[in-house]
Image: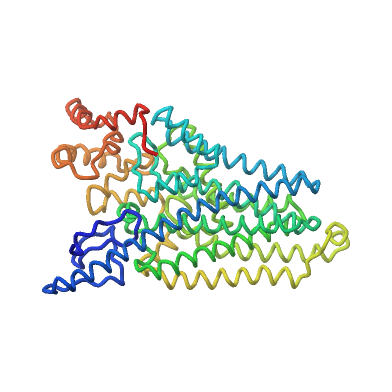
Amino acid sequence: MSVAQVKPEERSAPVVTYPDSDSRSSPTPNNVRFPPSGSSPVVKRKLSLVAVKDVFSHKAYSNGCLYIGAFLSFADMVSDALVINVFFETDQTSYAYITIASIMLCLTLQALIVIFNYRSVGKRRLLLELFYVVACMKPGIDAYRVAEEKPQLTNAMISPSNEMTFCRTSELFTESIPGACIQSYAIINGKDQGLTVVLSLASSVLSGSFISAAIAYEKDTSKEARSHSPQFYGYIPDALKPTIVVSLLMWVMSACQMSGKAFACALCAVQSRSMLLLFLFAEFFLFVLYKVVRRDYLYWIPLYGPAHYIMSTVVRVSVKFVVDFTGCLHFRHPYELGGFYMMFTIYTTPLLCLYFGSRYNVYADTEEGKEALPHVLAPGQVYTIIGTLIAIQFISFQVFLFSIKKDFLTTFYSTQTGPEMIQDLFNNGKDDREKIECLTINTVYWKAIEGEVRAWIKGKIPEWQESQPEWWNDRFKVLIPKSWLDEDEKRSVRESLTEASLYKAGGGKEEV
């Protein structure tokens, strides 16, 4: 089998093609050599086997990251249950109830995500998805769907990849990060907590930071993402070894930032919880003000009415909170924080941690502090812990920037907004598939060019109906507003919908 016959893998970063291929969404591994013209069949076969091996190596690594993330999510839930029991046994009921509340909030947010995504798919499918959430099976199910490249259902609002990102973000926002903060506070402010609490803290940090890195890795190496937004996705190198190095660097960066921020917040809360809340509120307020001034506050999800404003607020707050604690690099996307604000957050968070540490040292040296604190950390200990974490994070981030593809460095400080990105994608898209992506985004983002989009789609429908490109499926057909089409066009599009799609839309049995 020749190299050109190797079937591309959806989840693998590399796709085997000849050097003269015009594929933009499928970068070629740097370590795959192609047979020059006139090479013998034996040479071609050997190089083809190397290329196939590289593809499946990427596939195995990507899927391994997905399943490890799902396992760590479950392990973190188990460790939280164990630490709740410890808190009750040691009469620290307030910590126990707060931890229980964070777990319940996590499950509630995931249930709301499921309802939002599957409300138009059918009751049976919706109930099944809710069961996965209640049974704490959602991380594993999401990992399986993304690993097996399950397609987005016709009437589902978001793709399996985006659904997994939303659920993982909600887990970080409501469980992993709060758990790390609560357990850090309990260790600093309470009596000897024992090994269980310390291990649970380690579990929260390791799982939270891994999930953060996995979100960025999965989105950047997705063939679908690289195809739809090639100007943003693709910074991770194509060769396997550099890919592993970059993903590990993201994990280390996230673990250091999460550990340092949780420790610093616990130090601040020991002195004054109201002061901590004031600082957190100030961070959120500054970010919201930045988004509002730039007319980029509303979220990209195609939800309309008052629910859109509520969802935008919840998502903006949760994403900002997650970035503050984990530095998840995916959220530099213009639809989220944006590159500039992402870098601002990464570089200012260590300064805030140092400030919280200095406040704790001043407070611990007073008579009030000595009486209030069961055991006082020495100034040298505080600065050593925070300083070490900051140093490792900073060095890791610089090595990371040196290791990625240089063409994507601009995405780390770009000031482009979400509406600017989707409008630029439509105006300068390389093909119809890129340009029609705007239909999956809230119309608020492309209201300024709605007339152009409408005229373009009306002119293209006859061509698509005749040529039937691979991407011209039921998902996009049902996204076209009916008001844009005349009766003949409506009939043509409706008749081309498959029976299977109509069956799915009615709530028929679905493949998991």
Residue at the (47%, 53%) spot, across then down: 67
Residue at the (41%, 48%) spot, across then down: 161
Q: How many marks?
A: 0
Q: Quadrant of the N terminus?
A: bottom left
| Residue 231 in which image quadrant | bottom left
> In the displayed image of the protein, which residue is found farthest to the front?
42
Q: Quadrant of the C terminus?
A: top left
> Does the rendering let one see residue 164?
yes
Asked whether, in this view, residue 254 is left or right of residue 334, the answer is right
Residue at the (38%, 43%) spot, across then down: 159
Residue 259: horizontal and vertical position, in percent? 63, 61
Above or below for 235 versus 457: below
| Residue toward you, 228 or 211 | 211
Residue 318: horizontal and vertical position, in percent? 55, 47
| Residue toward you, 270 or 197 | 197
Residue 432: horizontal and vertical position, in percent? 22, 47
Above or below for 318 versus 345: above
Asked whether, in this view, residue 321 is left or right of residue 455, the answer is right
> Does the rendering let one see residue 341?
no
Residue 429: horizontal and vertical position, in percent? 26, 52
Q: How is the model colour-coded?
A: rainbow
> In the displayed image of the protein, which residue is found farthest to the left?
38
Residue at the (52%, 38%) spot, across then down: 133
